[in-house]
Image: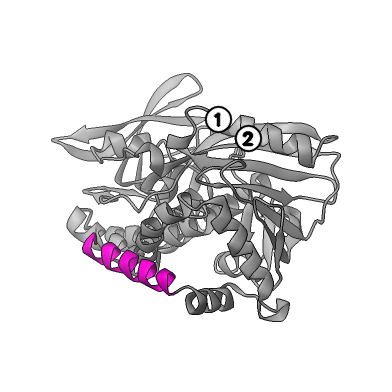
Amino acid sequence: MTKSKYDVVVIGAGPTGSTAARFAAENGASVLILERDREPGIPVRCAEGVSHAGLIRFIEPDPKWIAAKIEVAKLISPNGEVAYMHQNGTGYVLERRIFDTELCNIACSKGAELLTKADAIGLIFENEKIIGVKYKYLGEIKEVFCNIVIGADGIESRVGRWAGIKTDLALEDVDTCVQYTMTNINLDEEACEFYFGQNVSPGGYLWVFPKSKTTANVGIGIAGHLAEKKGPKEYLDEFIEKRFPNGKINYTVFGGVPTAATLKEIVKDNIMLVGDAARQVNPITGGGIIQGMVAAKICGIIAGEAVQNSKFEKKFLKKYRKEWDKELGNNQKVMFSLKEKFMCMTDERFNNLVKFCNSVPQEEFTTAALFKRAVKDDPKLVLDIAKAFVVSKLKK
């Protein structure tokens, strides 16, 4: 049975919500997680790829929620040339439904409580102060009171809007995405594929993330402002007709991914936003699982400290923003500043990039080595990165 009052209420039981709940509970807070679906991890709106290095910071990899182990990344240029990245670290394609449940189980083992089929419908205010959450549960409107609300409710983030936080995104800062889980296909189960080009995925990329030798997540994300005349589903269907003509689709998902810098405001009195809700996603790759979990750990720890010190005002909670910027937020600003250059790359530039990748000896082909070689051969890239870094600092 849930109580009427908790120190912290987390809205959303995805990886960020469960991680925030875990670390808040570990740091002495009583925590309730409200999840609107019947269980964590559904529906799956994600390519499900993560790095081993990022994951190991939070949980030991377990075969029960790993569909495939990835050792190679294939970069495919518009002209069909392929570059193979073998030294970029091990990655995994997850089974998110099982993975998300496991993260939630960990949070509950630390003392958090989970309530599913509980759809948050508003915040409770008293004298303009947030004191709790209204939610709909089994057809009834209920209330739970708390000192801190953590909004981990994804890109739509009603929580942020309810609290008066500006969460708007420009069309060019949202990737519109479609993904199919496909079967009856043949592929290398240890290799992810990334396709680029204005006729393939304008302002984004198309991916194939294997889950076995015969199944994969096949998806696309394109910049929102470039999807007016031709949508991502059309691009994806054209690709599949060529790449997997005999493939069968057994799961379809549509969604959006924020490709902006972190929101200017992610805390106010008695409230914190985390993950997609706070726009804590890599603006170039669209990767948000690990970034969100990194932010959630910081968020949960600060929430726990706030409870210990009975300090729930923005003045105290903004320590979360400071630590986030130090960890990944400032880097995200740089990536955001560089994103426009990536979006505007011509097919010729993509072709030359993949050709350049193939000139690097395979045993030396890491992201770091590639960057060093690219800088050496392209002085303009140094200037672009320097400018982006300066701009990120000015916007800080």
Q: Is residue 248 left or right of residue 32?
A: right
In the rendered image, the vertical position of residue 192 relative to residue 161, given as above or below: below
- Residue 201 visible within the image: yes
Q: Which mark is residue 282?
A: none
The residue pinned by badge 2 equals 235
| Frontmost residue, 110 versus 185 | 185
Marks 2 & 1, CB-CB < 8 Å contact: yes
Q: Alpha-carbon neighbours of circle 1 within 10 Å: few (<14), some, or many (≥20)?
A: some
User: Residue 68 occupies which quadrant of the picture?
Assistant: bottom right
- Residue 10 visible within the image: no
| Dominant secondary structure, magenta | helix
Q: Which residues are magenta?
A: 379-396
Circle 1: residue type: Gly
Residue at position x 55%, y 78% from top? 373
SS under mark 1: loop
Residue 326 in the image, given as x and y percentages of width and height = 34, 70
User: Residue 298 occupies which quadrant of the picture?
Assistant: bottom left
Circle 2: residue type: Tyr
Determine if the magenta segment contains residue 383. yes
The residue pinned by badge 1 equals 231
